[in-house]
Amino acid sequence: MRTAFLLNGIPVETETRPTETLLDWLRTHRGLTGTKEGCNEGDCGACTVVVTDRERGARALNACILFLPQLHGKAVRTVEGLGDDGAPHPAQQAMVDHHGSQCGFCTPGFVAAMAAAHAEERSDHADALAGNLCRCTGYAPILRAAKAIETAPRPAWVAGDRAALDTHRSFFLGEISSGGEAAQPPRGADSPPDPACVLPETSDQLATWYAAHPDATLIGGATDVGLWVTKELRDLGPVAFLHRCRDLQEIEVGEREIRIGAAVTLDRVRALMAEYHPSFAELLRRYGSAQVRAAATLGGNIANGSPIGDSPPPLIALGATLHLRHGATRRSLPLEDFFLDYGRQDRAPGEFVEAVSFPRRPDRLRVWKVSKRFDQDISAVCGAFDLAVEDGRIAAARIAFGGMAATPKRARAVETALLGQPLTPEGVAAADAAWTEDFRPISDMRASADYRLNVARNLLQRYALDHAGRATSVLEVRP
């Protein structure tokens, strides 16, 4: 299929396979080998590039799990294109000045991530660079380099790429209909639309196409699907890329309800939750990395049905409703009812997640993720708690966990045992015996079954201590 975008400021139009990654294309077809392949699964950051679009500006993304059609109408900067007029980017110069480059393999990815953070005017450098791994353990000088460029002028391309996308909108963002079903990138005048790959502009177009191609793969951020290609070498068959469906990217905050479109990225969900449920936002701070959060979508994290997906437990605790669509037919169900068993969800062929909504109410939510590492790690246990208290007693409780069962799951027996109890460490201990009614966790490489049950009980105790205003966190020491 044909994809058009800006590469280091130069218009590019190329014909590729729908699932060819940007990393492979850069190195194989353009000779831009500064972008490195490390893990090839979006963890190490050696392949980081800067991607700019008209709506959101510049952000760091992993080229190894970024398919070329996802770049249609955007601007890409590799490490070779970060400087201006032959002068190095401030991040490149700072890495030299502060001795931030050791063996050098990871350095281009660090520089690209720093350049994106600089363009966004970020100062949370440890978080911005958490998706980049230095094999030589040189994080301190790299963080000093990131700090040093906070006030440096932004290169001209930061604004120039967005201006170029506006100028060339007719070329880059031209809408060509696939028989009225879904928009596609530009093709030759005599080339028929390719039904095996579409970039729909609306959920209506997606619904029509997906109902006719129920075995197709839907691609949001490709942070999960990308590994099907790079690690499992799967042929995905017909694919639809969802990043141009604007109505699936909408966030609606009403008086009684908050509704989030399925294609809203997790960095935007985090920004939203920082205002309404800060504990949820803090959880998402630890979801993947800046590169992953800028690509991964809320709908994708839910629809893949992982028992250790981090977004379902807090959403279930908030009483979330999932909204599904098949053609012109829509239905809604409680989010906890969507997960039927391991790898099995209540979703028919040709049906897709359209949005998730939850009641807007005072913040009582607390979410804690327990994992071996702080950054970029899979949860051993993720617990979410929302307890309402009246006259000093627990009047309502919604508790959900990831990592404790074959699906994200509510602790219904524990919830029942808590009703009428005081929200104190002694009061919540009344539910201790109920945990084994709700969960029989497994032992695996992340944690033993006994450990998971003990952690779950302790997190409920932590909620009670937090409610009483007692300190529950140790001092976080980070470089």
Image (cartoon, grey):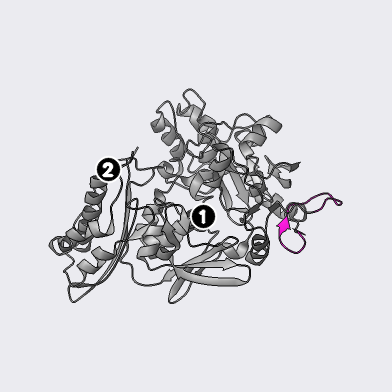
Q: Which residue is mark 2?
A: 448
Q: Which residue is farthest left?
A: 426
Q: Which residue is farthest right?
A: 190
Q: Classify 172 as above or below 397.
A: above
Identify the residue shown where x is 71% and y is 55%.
166
Q: Position of residue 199 (x, y in %)?
A: 68, 55
Q: Main secondary structure of the magenta part?
A: loop
Q: Is residue 153 visible?
A: no
The amino acid type found where label 2 is placed reads: Ser
Q: Which residue is mark 1?
A: 300
Tell me the crowding category of disc 2: few under 14, some 14 to 19, or many 20 or more residues within 10 angstroms, Cα based: some
In reply to whether residue 57 is colored magenta, the answer given is no
Which quadrant of the structure image shows residue 429?
Answer: bottom left
Q: Position of residue 84 (x, y in %)?
A: 64, 37
The amino acid type found where label 1 is placed reads: Gly
Q: Is 348 situated left or right of 321 in this image?
A: right
Identify the residue shown where x is 46% and y is 69%.
333
Look at the image and tell me in which quarter the C terminus lies: top left
Identify the residue shown where x is 25% and y is 64%.
413
In reply to whether residue 189 is colored magenta, the answer given is yes
Q: Is 290 situated left or right of 201 in this image?
A: left
**Which is more N-terminal, label 2 or label 1?**
1
Looking at the image, which is closer to me, 107 or 377? 377
Chain part drawn in magenta? 177-192
